[in-house]
Amino acid sequence: MNSVQILGNLARDPEVRFTKTGKAVATFTVAATNTYFDSTTNEQKEQTSFINCVVWGKLGEAVGNLRKGNRCFVEGRLNTRSYETADGQKRYVTEVIANFVGQSLQAQANEPSNFDSFGGGNEENIPF
């Protein structure tokens, strides 16, 4: 099973583009922080991962309304692809292809989170 769930803050504003056929695709980065205990220094530490995400269709258009710093939940699958640069070097990209993105509107008001403002993209075929 290839399933990913991420809870974090947007590291930058989402970028929404449209394919030649008019289908929306949004790219964004989620900063997810993990807290752990370092036994050598007896300190609690944080490690932040910046995770690239892609979402297609109507959900991609909706994600375009989010802004840097917004708390969000992303569910999808991990995908790795490669491409060749102009000078012939092969590059690899790992990203989450999202089928659900939710935003916590209450997070700024210190209330319990509710991620109902966005939904899943299951009604559309999401390309590989």
Image (cartoon, rainbow, N blue to C red):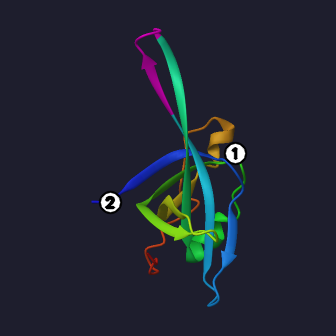
Q: In the image, what residue occupies the spot 60% across and 38% down? A: 111
Q: Is residue 59 above or below residue 48?
A: below
> Where does residue 15 sit, x and y in percent of width and height?
70, 65
Report the Cα–Cα distance between label 1 and label 2: 27 Å
Marks 1 & 2, CB-CB < 8 Å contact: no
Q: Amino acid at mark 2?
A: Asn
- Identified by mark 1, the residue type is Gly
Nearest to the observer: residue 128 or residue 59 = 128
Residue indicated by mark 1: 69
Q: Residue at x 35, y 57 (%)?
A: 3
Q: Helix, strand or loop at disc 2?
A: loop
Foreground disc of the pair 1, 2: 2
| Residue sitting at x 68%, y 38% | 109
Residue position marked by numbered label 2 in the rendering: 2
In the displayed structure, does residue 47 sit left or right of residue 87?
left
- Res 18 quadrant in image: bottom right
> Is the residue 91 above or below the residue 24 in the image?
above
Q: Is residue 112 magenta?
A: no
Tell me residue 68's x, y (percent).
72, 50
In magenta, the rendered stretch is: 34-42
| Of the pair 6 and 65, the residue shown nearer to us | 6
The crowd level at tag 2 (other Cα within 10 Å; few <14, some 14-19, many 20+) is: few
Work out which quarter of the rendered image holds the N terminus and state it: bottom left
